[in-house]
Amino acid sequence: MAPLLILVGVTLLLRLLGFFGLKRLRSWHVSIRGGLAAMFTVTGVSHFGGLREDFVAMVPPVLPFPELLVTLTGILELLGAAGLLYHRTAPWAAAGLGCLLVAMFPANVYAAVADITFDDGPAAALLPRSVMQLVFIAATVFLVLPYIEDFRNRPGEPAMIKLPPTQ
């Protein structure tokens, strides 16, 4: 639940700052980038801190090297969070993080159905956990869609993504 609160809270805070005059934060696109960056920074760092053992326990037993997988996903989350902060890398970072969320979904399902304890309590049930994961994926898709639409509307041109102007 904490990652969802971070995403929503930081996004709304940035949007509010935009409303009160910070030009760069006047769009939902930029605010959601900031919210996702904050969320993935917190979750990425937690892969190396006190929740590490919980994350290792979440890895389904069919996957080899759970500690290595937790380390790799933590690094990817931190790199993705950094990539979201720069407008030229943001669409690529969002797409990569969206794929990472899909790839990590089996660990969330396993944690819910195998009654894995998480942060000294039971893991969230499958439905709320799945809904949160869908919200995170939807946020990454929201960030990528404008770039895909721009690319689709330019047939016959080289495969380059035109970035929207920074706000």
Image (cartoon, grey):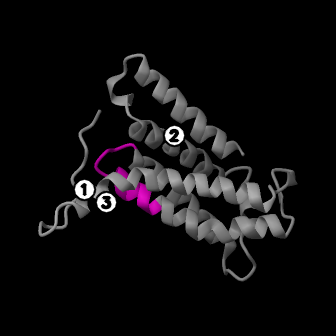
Residue type of the residue flagged with mark 1: Asp
Q: Position of residue 92 (x, y in %)?
A: 36, 58
Disc 3 from disc 1: Cα separation = 5 Å
Decide if residue 167 is on the left or right side of residue 2: left
Q: Where is residue 84 in the image (x, y as percent from the top left)?
A: 41, 47
Task: Kindly identify which residue carries mark 1.
Answer: 150
Disc 1 from disc 2: Cα separation = 24 Å
Mark with earlier residue (3, 2): 2
Residue type of the residue flagged with mark 2: Gly
In the depicted structure, whether residue 137 falls above or below residue 14: below
Task: Kindly identify which residue carries mark 2.
Answer: 35
**Pointers 3 and 1 in contact (C-beta within 8 Å):** yes
Q: Position of residue 11 (x, y in %)?
A: 52, 35
Task: Kindly identify which residue carries mark 3.
Answer: 148
Quadrant placement of the C terminus = top left
Q: Where is residue 151 in the image (x, y as percent from the top left)?
A: 24, 61
